[in-house]
Amino acid sequence: MLEPENKPVIMIVDDEPQNIEILGNILSGQAVLKVATNGQKAVEMVHSESIDLILLDIEMPLLNGYEVCRQIKMIQKFAAIPIIFVTGKDKEGDEIKGFDIGAVDYITKPFSPALVRARVKAHLALRKAQADLEQHNETLKSYLKLLEDIERIGRHDLKGSLSPILGFSELLLMDPTITREQREALSTIRSSGLRLLNMINQSLDLFRIEAGTYHLTPQPVDLIKVFRNIAREQESLWRNKNSPLELHANHGSNEAPEHFMVSGEEGLLYTMFTNLLKNAWEATPNESPVNVSMHFCPWAEIRIQNSGVVPSEIRSTFFCKFVTLGKKGGTGLGAYSAKLMAKALFGTISLEIIDEKSTVIAVNLPSYEGQLPGKTISPPRQSLASPSLFFE
Amino acid sequence: MKILIVEDDPGTRKYMVKAAQTLGHEVQEAEDGEAGCKAFDKFEPDIVLSDIQMPRADGLELLERLRRKSDDAIIIMTTAMDSAEYTVKALQLHANDYLVKPVQFSVLKAALAKYSEILNSRTKDQEVLGLFEKRYYRLKLPNQPELVSRIADRLLAETVNSIARKERMGVRLGLTELLSNAIEHGTLGITYEEKSKALEAGGSAWRNLVNDRLHSEPFCNRQTIVEFEMNDQGCEWYIKDDGEGFDWNNLPDPLDPENLLCEHGRGIMLAQLQFDEFEFSGNGNEVRMKKNCCR
């Protein structure tokens, strides 16, 4: 981008030789100067010279300054070159029009040498900073790609090694002649293997959600069923401290809640609510239940409340990666992955502390209306498009 | 059945071989595509189960070579699904199906049972039937899932000169899938979850589920209609069942790698790849497929 002597290259575009001479004198010390005396030449020179900044007169015959600016901005590889308009008039309308089509600044005649030098310097510095950032971003992207490749290979090999573990244990379990002890050992091997497989698959899903490439296939899912299954699966967690799960669903009628339908993927919903409920059960004091209340507004809102309080120092970062406090063996990934999953489900998640007495995690999800598919209400927020963590 | 297993990981290979033997099949193994190709010539298997990613002639290369030798062998790819693009490519190269690794015994059992059934109901002697030029018929199907592969065989019988040899197995599998779909999910109203649960439970659970539906309202009063027409343009099939249908607007695109792990609609997704025209209508209880004439 810079000439050998490391001076920036500035192109002055003006049809009046006098202006060129004045601007040339002002800038000669700080830059290498190129001159174009009409719009057509200016556009040609952008292609042939490597220009760092353009001073562009608005009023020129044939191709005027606005048109030159528009043509340059249309070419992707030159669009980032800062263009400063030069005009004799001091009309606000002209300025706004210039900014609209992509100019970064304005200088008006008669020129103040100090001001011209200061503005040019500021915009050159800005452009350089921008270019540096772009390069950093490219480097980061390539690192991320590398990381993805490593992870993918890792998962491939892990899954490959699981095949015989899962397969042979399943085959051997079918043999009626094995002893009870052998059966128990095989069952343990098999369920550990399945857990491992589940972990690998989940990490793959999370990874895709993080990268914004997860592809959701929404189905109607009954959350009452999901919550009951989680409570059964995590019984050891709440049974000892006697903090059962209490479910309340409000359909606007007095009927007992048998179903609460949302639109999503059962696996994702199951994992997300397992993470959130585990946190709630761990946080709530002995003998106090974890309450889950659900209602439509018109999308589905699910509020998980426990009587523990999230410490104030981690409230603002509660859903960030690796945030954990005072929990033995806590990875700090539970709430973070729950948030990612809520996002993948086209939902939202938030934390509320009520009177410093209890904690509520509120999850908003698309509801599922009626008996036939294809009638989901538009989700509260569609935000899956942002591509990844680093480049938002 | 004669089954060839091609897999580079020794542990996985041992398991797959043992599993297929346990199911009563005659099995040979190969450790890479190169060896797989040689074994294919000698062993002449009915079904090939091949890993996609392997050293020395990977699964895709093997698939291409095998398809040059045989249009009739059922070729099923096994894949860890970390790069789904390969699997899409395999389907485009006329692999018949794919199984996601690690392949659970129950999944392998169901797949081999399905393909054995299809291969067993195949009529070999078709020279005379191939002379038909025009044909139309309409069938009223009983609600019996076990008849499906024989019905598909009948539907294909006269198409010998109309559908290219290399496409016939795919069309056969596609028809089988769509007929099963019409009877099981349509007329008998069995959901995907109910079916997998029954198959997982094993024993007579599936048989019992089908029997229950056959004898209860409203399922026992429903039927499936099939129409078939062949002329010099090609073959066209129309299947309509009396079931409640499904939302066919959201059918997953079979060529988008992201869809390959979807459990729902997987069969239909594979089936639609086999036809030149494919269209659901009504509530999703009607489907029309067309295969252009190869002559």
Image: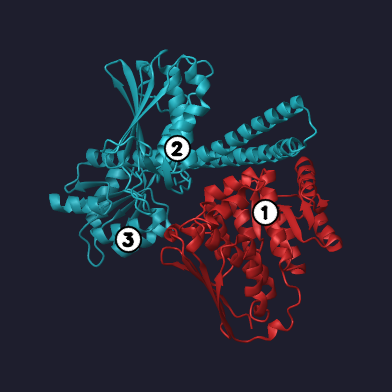
Chain colours: A cyan, B red
Chain of the residue displaying label 2:
A
Q: Position of residue B253 (x, y in %)?
A: 50, 59
Q: CA distance from mark 1 to mark 3?
A: 61 Å
Q: Amino acid at mark 1?
A: Ala
Nearer-the-camera pick, A350 or B279: B279
Q: Quadrant of residue A113?
A: top left
Nearer-the-camera pick, B123 or A26: B123
Q: Position of residue A317 (x, y in %)?
A: 38, 24
Q: CA distance from mark 2 to mark 3?
A: 50 Å
Residue assigned mark 2 = A269
Nearer-the-camera pick, A369 or A300: A369
Q: Amino acid at mark 3?
A: Gln
Give the total number of marks visible in the rendering.
Answer: 3
Q: Position of residue B62 (x, y in %)?
A: 74, 59
Q: Quick check: A375 left or right of B177?
A: left
Residue assigned mark 1 = B111
Q: Quick check: A128 left or right of A58?
A: right
Which of the two discs, 2 and 3, labels the residue nearer the N terminus? 3
